[in-house]
Image (tube, rainbow, N blue to C red):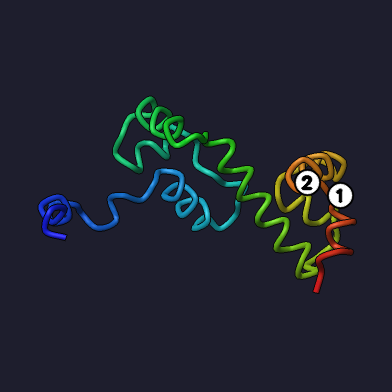
Amino acid sequence: FLQDSPADLITIPGEEISYRAKIRTQLMQQQEILRCPDFEQLATHFNISSQTLRRKLKTEGTAYGIIKDEIRRDIAIDKLSSDAGSVDSIARALGFSESRSFTRAFRKWTGHSPSEYKTIYSH
C-alpha cells in the first residue's frame, strides 16, 4: 500500500475511465440514437481535438463507428428480448432504411436473425 500510495494520491477519481466508456455514456444520454453528434462535436465536448480522440480510441482498440454499432446492437437486443415491437419497427427506430439491412447487421452482431433471436430469447 505505502509503495503505491503517492501515485494513488495524485490520481483523480474518474480520470481512468476510457474514452469508449465516456462516449457510450454520452450517446446513451441522447434522446434518440439517430441524433448522435458527429465526431468533431464529440471531440469538442471532451475538450480535445478530433485527431487526439481518434488516436485515444485507436489505442483502446475501437472507433466511433464501432461504439455506435455496439449501442445499436444493445438496443436491438433489449427490444427483441422484451418483445418491444416488430423487427420492422425496431429496424426503423435504429435508423436502418429497410429491415433486410437490419437483419444483416444483427446476424453479424449475434449470429442470429432478429426473428430467431426473438424466438429464442424473448421473455
Q: Could you say where residue 6 lies in the image, as x and y percent from the top left?
A: 10, 52
Residue at 41%, 49% in the rendered image: 22
Residue 117's quadrant in the figure? Answer: bottom right
* Mark 1–mark 2 distance (CA, rounded to whole Å): 6 Å
Q: Reading the chain from its start, which is encountered first: label 1 or label 2? A: 2
Label 1's element?
loop
Nearest the eye: 40 or 58: 58
In this picture, is 21 found above or below 84?
Answer: above
Under mark 2, the amino acid is Phe
Q: Could you say where residue 3 lies in the image, as x and y percent from the top left?
A: 13, 53
In this picture, is 123 found above or below 20?
Answer: below
- Left or right: 116, with 105 as reference point: right
- Left or right: 98, with 94 as reference point: right
Q: Could you say where residue 42 lies in the image, as x and y percent from the top left?
A: 42, 40
Judging by the rendered image, the residue that carries numbered circle 1 is 113
Judging by the rendered image, the residue that carries numbered circle 2 is 106
Residue at 71%, 45% in the rendered image: 95
Task: Tell me the crowding category of disc 1: few under 14, some 14 to 19, or many 20 or more residues within 10 angstroms, Cα based.
Answer: some
Residue 79's quadrant in the figure? Answer: bottom right
Label 2's element?
helix
